[in-house]
């Protein structure tokens, strides 16, 4: 146990000193063309979040799903045109994605001050950053300069690249390692689950598949609560949901506290608390929120740099929901 604590301490002492390497973006990209863009996004979303406190979780998830399919290029915002192949939003794995129109609202605010200067992709990343900061999490310094995709991927690509609710620890570590994340950062980025809800459809297998052993690793009262809240049946599973943790409107480390108590909602939440590759980070984050915030911030920047388009590789859409 002493050795594990030492390893974790050394990791946090040295790892985040060096920042993000290989990211082709800039921390001063809009210094001349739209220096007020971050304030516009922040002020616009503050009012929206007060009216609808479920919006931060939705925007954070929207960023995750955009960046995992073809990179952070705002392709998830594009609506299908008449007669076209269904866009990535038609993927069953994008079930429950909400609040895409909020990005268009914020985009219109930015356009009023800085016409055709700021991409929808950058606005989406800034919105996700504010979702974290305005709910009590860290204010993350993020590089900018992304361009929007001039085309949208098909729903088949989204089906292939978005991880299923049944993904395990090895799958998760592999996915995020491809984006340059360490195991600790991979555990930290999933701390985004501290905001929002989980649809019952994503935990039906955990609750009702015979002989899967899932219920044995849950705290008994929590397992009973989940089965009461999410009764068996496809209609119920699509309509019903459970809170990700007791403070689901606040960005904090309660996700890790719950997981370590056998109250992880999703399969990955429970498995990370038990797997030797991740358990020590889960334990550390459950008692040290500052280190979680630091690791999450580093992971967030790496995710936001994933597969970005810059310069002539992409475009700046005037309307976020349409290619042209």
Image (spheres, helix red, strand yellow):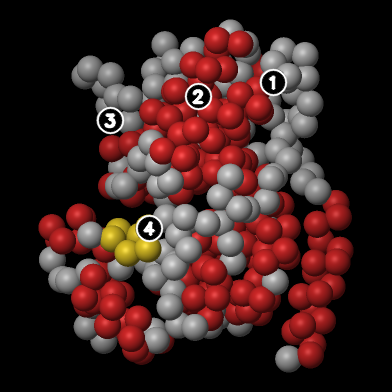
Residue 314 in which image quadrant: top right
Cα separation, mark 2 vs mark 4, equals 24 Å
Q: Secondary structure at mark 3?
A: loop
Label 1: few (<14), some (14–19) or many (≥20) C-alpha neighbours in 10 Å: some
> Where does label 3 land, which residue?
86
Q: What label sits on residue 36 in the rendered view?
A: 1
Mark whose residue sits in front, 4 or 3: 4
Judging depth in this view, the residue of 314 and 201 nearest the camera is 201
Q: What label sits on residue 127 in the rendered view?
A: none
Q: Position of residue 160 (x, y in %)?
A: 39, 48
Q: Is residue 13 above or below residue 37?
A: below
Cα separation, mark 4 vs mark 3, equals 27 Å
Instruction: Give the mark nearest the N terminus, 4 or 1.
Output: 1
Q: What label sits on residue 197 in the rendered view?
A: 4
Quarter of the image containing the N terminus?
bottom right
Q: What label sits on residue 106 in the rendered view?
A: 2
**Residue under the image location 77 percent in, 14 percent down:** 32
Instruction: Give the mark nearest the N terminus, 3 or 2.
Output: 3
**Residue under the image location 79 percent in, 44 percent down:** 21
Kindly check if marks 1 and 3 are in contact, taking CB atoms under 8 A apart as contact.
no
Cα separation, mark 2 vs mark 1, equals 13 Å
Mark whose residue sits in front, 1 or 3: 1
Label 3: few (<14), some (14–19) or many (≥20) C-alpha neighbours in 10 Å: some
């Amino acid at each position: 146990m002493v050795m594990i604590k030492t390893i974790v301490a050394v990791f946090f002492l040295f790892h985040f000193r060096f920042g993000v390497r290989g990211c082709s973006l800039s921390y001063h990209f809009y210094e001349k063309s739209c220096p007020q863009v971050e304030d516009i996004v922040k002020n616009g979303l503050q009012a929206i979040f007060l009216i609808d406190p479920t919006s931060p979780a939705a925007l954070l998830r929207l960023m995750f799903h955009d960046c995992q399919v073809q990179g952070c290029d705002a392709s998830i915002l594009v609506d299908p045109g008449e007669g076209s192949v269904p866009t990535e939003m038609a993927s069953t794995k994008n079930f429950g994605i909400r609040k895409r129109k909020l990005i268009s609202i914020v985009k219109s605010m930015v356009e009023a001050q800085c016409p055709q200067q700021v991409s929808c992709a950058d606005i989406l990343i800034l919105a996700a950053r504010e979702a974290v900061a305005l709910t009590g999490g860290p204010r993350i310094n993020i590089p900018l300069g992304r361009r929007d995709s001039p085309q949208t991927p098909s729903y088949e690509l989204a089906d292939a690249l978005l991880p299923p609710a049944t993904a395990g620890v090895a799958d998760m570590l592999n996915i995020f390692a491809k984006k340059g994340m360490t195991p600790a950062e991979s555990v930290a980025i999933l701390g985004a689950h501290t905001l929002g809800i989980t649809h019952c459809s994503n935990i039906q297998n955990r609750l009702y598949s015979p002989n899967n052993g899932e219920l044995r690793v849950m705290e008994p009262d929590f397992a009973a609560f989940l089965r009461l809240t999410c009764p068996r049946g496809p209609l119920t599973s699509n309509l019903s949901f459970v809170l990700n943790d007791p403070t689901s409107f606040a960005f904090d480390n309660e996700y890790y506290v719950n997981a370590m108590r056998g109250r992880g909602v999703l399969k990955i939440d429970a498995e990370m608390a038990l797997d030797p590759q991740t358990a020590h980070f889960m334990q550390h984050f459950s008692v040290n929120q500052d280190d979680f915030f630091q690791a999450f911030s580093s992971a967030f920047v790496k995710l936001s740099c994933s597969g970005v388009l810059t310069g002539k590789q992409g475009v700046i859409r005037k309307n976020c929901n349409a290619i042209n």
